[in-house]
Image (cartoon, grey):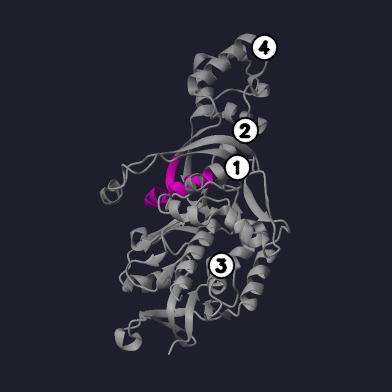
Amino acid sequence: MYDFDVIVVGGGAAGFYGAIQIAEANRNLKVAILERGKQVLSKVRVSGGGRCNVTHAEFDPGALTKNYPRGEKELLGPFHTHCTGDVVAFFEDRNVPLKIESDGRMFPVSDTSASIIDCFLNETKNLGIQLLKNSPVTDLKPLNNEEAGNEGGWRVFSAKKEYVAKKLLLTTGSNQKIWNILSRLGHNIIAPVPSLFTFNIKDPRISGIQGLSSHAAVEVVPRKLSKEISISLRSNAAKRRALTSEGPLLITHWGMSGPAILKLSAWGARDLNAYEYKFKIRINWLPDYHRDGVLSHLQEIKAVEPKKTILRTKAVEIPRRLWINLVQASGISRDMQWAAASAKDMERLTEQLTQSIFTVEGKSTFKEEFVTAGGVDLKEVNFKTFESKKHPHLYFAGEIINVDAITGGFNFQNAWTGAYIAAQAIASAFD
């Protein structure tokens, strides 16, 4: 009656990792991966500029969870079960050693995602896992008692064929069609919104200095929302942290990017969506200093170097071209000397350095990394097994559930961990 013991829907990172772990844990199981397209592992292929940012060199489960705007609490237990070191060991055991870069990101030593893809394809072949491409799933139905007795299972409808499996692992990422099916099956789907995006900003202070990077602290300036949106957010008001971030900020042709902006976009994914991506940010280009400290420093320079031109001095540790733009934005002329600067001039310059306000008018996708916040409600997932609390024999892994992370390999780590734990639960059910 059963075509497969286990069907994995989704030929991405979590799907392959889960299928391999299932087949390794129980060699007698008949396992298949259903992939909707003609290519598998497409996100793995483009990750990290084609090098595949496999994970991040954070080996402490508690510290690791701090990189997940959604899922921080739920992932603590799973990370104690299967964490970064386990993923490193998995690939090294298969002759794909990983390396750590200066920012903590981990890549294959080969510097190509092909190493990861070849590893997965070789393992599925060696383990006898069937890979069924061009098989988009159109519906899922649990077997009734007449069909399955006490064994249970699922009927999987694809564009090509209908399959029956005892266990089902869904690793379809941000696939709206699968979310719609799960919604019909009674699961609550948290509406998806973009995460990990850059800010579109047109401003003379950053014009002509594309490619420049500077360490900065960034804060979203709260704005009033419509009554309906305010009500929807109010229930989480106590839990929501201030939308602030610190790190390298990259000035681009379209506005701002870099870790400081990307972290802010991830933590603020829902609020910024409610703002329709039109809001203001406040930037402190000298995050180690507060406003009064910077003003005092500028006043000292004025006293010591009165005859020097302000524009050419670069009194603080920021890139020179940024200093010039901020000085000019303060209303200070190109040839003004420190001695001629009024108290108002000094205050305006201090404000530009520590409290610059920029207007964001939209977003852009960060490289090829399209990540969404949303998915299966975390309350409906058993994080000891990653099994659905609504339906037995149904498991999840990866971005299909409402978990997402900042950039740096953390989204893949969620996929590896969820897939491993689901795989162990599935395999042990057949013992």
Are there few (<14), some (14-19), or many (20+) residues within 10 Å of tag 2? Answer: many
Quarter location, residue 401? bottom left
What is the three-letter code of the residue carrying label 1? Ile
Q: Look at label 4 and name its amino acid.
A: Lys
Say which residue appears at 52% left-offset and 23% top-offset: 350
Residues at marks 1 and 2 touching, judged by CB atoms closer than 8 Å: yes
Assign the magenta stretch its main secondary structure: helix
Number of numbered callouts drawn: 4
Asked whether the residues under the numbered discs 1 and 4 touch, taking CB atoms below 8 Å apart as contact, a structural biologist would say no
Q: Which residue is identified by label 4? A: 307
Give the magenta range: 261-280
- Residue sitting farthest toward the bottom: 1
Image quarter for residue 157? Answer: bottom left
Q: Position of residue 195 (x, y in %)?
A: 47, 54
Q: Earlier in the sequence, mark 1 or mark 3?
A: 3
Q: In 3D space, how far apart are the residues under numbered discs 1 and 2 (Cα atoms)?
A: 10 Å
Q: Which residue is mark 2?
A: 322
Q: Position of residue 129 (x, y in %)?
A: 58, 79
Give x and y (percent) for residue 366: 56, 54
